[in-house]
Amino acid sequence: MHQAQEEISRCIECELCLEVCPTYQATGERLFSPMERLKTAERILKGESPNSREIESIYNCPKCMQCEAVCPEEIKVTQVIHWTREELVRRGFGPLPRHDEIIQGILKQGNSVNGDPKRRLEWLPEEFPRKESETLLYLGCLPSYLVKESATSTYLVLKKLRVDFMILEDEGCCGTYIYEAGRRDFAGELFEKNVDRFKSRGIKQLLVPCNGCLKCFKYFYPEVLGQMDFSVHHVLEVIYSRLKEEPSLLKRVSRPVTYQDSCRLSRGEGMTEEPRELLKLCGAELKEPEKNRAEAPCCGAGAGIRSVYRDLSMKLASNLLSQIPAEEVVSACPFCVFNLSYTSRKKELGKKLTYFTTLILESLGGK
Ligand code: SF4
Ligand code: SF4
Ligand code: SF4
């Protein structure tokens, strides 16, 4: 039996997951609920041909893990969905044309956001530092091209905290988008190229500001290539441990903010208190939404859905923003910052999105 079928067979149809699933709640379509996705996955994995709505249901899940947080049977719903995406690709039903366009962009230009590689380092506030280190700050496509403030402030904060690190001039993409679309073959090739590059530069540790990169390097690389000889950390971990030791470096930034828990850091990594403590050390006044930490809603950007199902992605983002009490929303995920600020602008919701290192930098006295 396929591992997925073993997972699926444990479903007792209690429907608890329907209450928390954002795609079901936003559309009212049972097909877009975790329970129905499991049934669809079962049929596909048994060899039945899916119709277009069923394919959509497998690809329009942002893998927010809210279902997994409430499932009494601890079913790995997102893993089943991923295996099903790979099966769709094997049988020629996936990836979808829009996925293919982006994958081609990554393979040709080395980034997932159609950025001009010559402009990749525009975020860098100084000359490129020709410095070697065993620690690589891997910025990622989103921070490098679309949420540049997150790249610049992360770089400056790490420097101010005297963290020893290097950056790459021609960084490329981690490949998470390709993996999430189910193209394990192309993803594996890209992963191998990156690993070889890290090896040749003597990299032992990766620091990443992007949650997509975090998930990819930490979980997808070992899953596809086996054990890695570098460790992977969100920059939050390093910044938190430094500033906890030296809180006197921070000056008060007294204003109300809401910390937005991203799916990956809260449900994925259990990292919910460190960012809050950091913001408090900066003097920010935290305003909690009713659903926070492991119960926090999904921003609707992840696992490839924003690029293909933009309306659904924006619905999820608006739903999240409507629950945020403060005007300023601080996040530790550049993709959340990007999708939420885009949605806030488009729908005139009046929220200001800030990547957390921007606030830390301000509290450290700026540049
Ligand atoms: S991961 Fe999120 S969107 Fe996907 S089925 Fe589970 S609750 Fe629904
Ligand atoms: S919560 Fe778990 S067991 Fe209950 S319906 Fe959803 S997937 Fe099945
Ligand atoms: S996870 Fe990061 S590097 Fe990878 S595609 Fe997304 S933004 Fe780019």
Image (cartoon, helix red, strand yellow):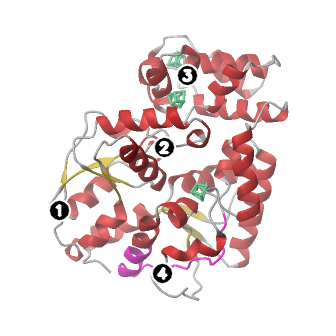
Q: Looking at numbered disc 1 in the image, what kind of residue is underneath it? A: Gly
Q: Looking at numbered disc 4 in the image, what kind of residue is underneath it? A: Asp
Q: Which residue is mark 2?
A: 268
Q: Position of residue 245 (x, y in %)?
A: 28, 71
Label 2 CA crowd tier, 10 Å (few <14, some 14–19, many 20+): some
Magenta stretch, main secondary structure class: loop
Nearest to the eye among marks 4 and 1: give it: 1
The residue range painted magenta reads: 155-172
* 169 falls in the magenta region: yes
Q: Looking at numbered disc 2 in the image, what kind of residue is underneath it? A: Gly
Q: Which residue is mark 1?
A: 283
**Hey, which residue is sitting farthest top in the picture?**
13
Q: Is residue 58 above or below residue 10?
A: below
* 265 falls in the magenta region: no
Q: Which residue is mark 3?
A: 34
Helix, strand or loop under label 4: loop
- How far apart are labels 3 and 4 at the CA level? 43 Å
Instruction: Report if the CB atoms under discs 3 and 2 are less than 8 Å apart.
Output: no
Q: Is residue 106 above or below residue 270?
A: below
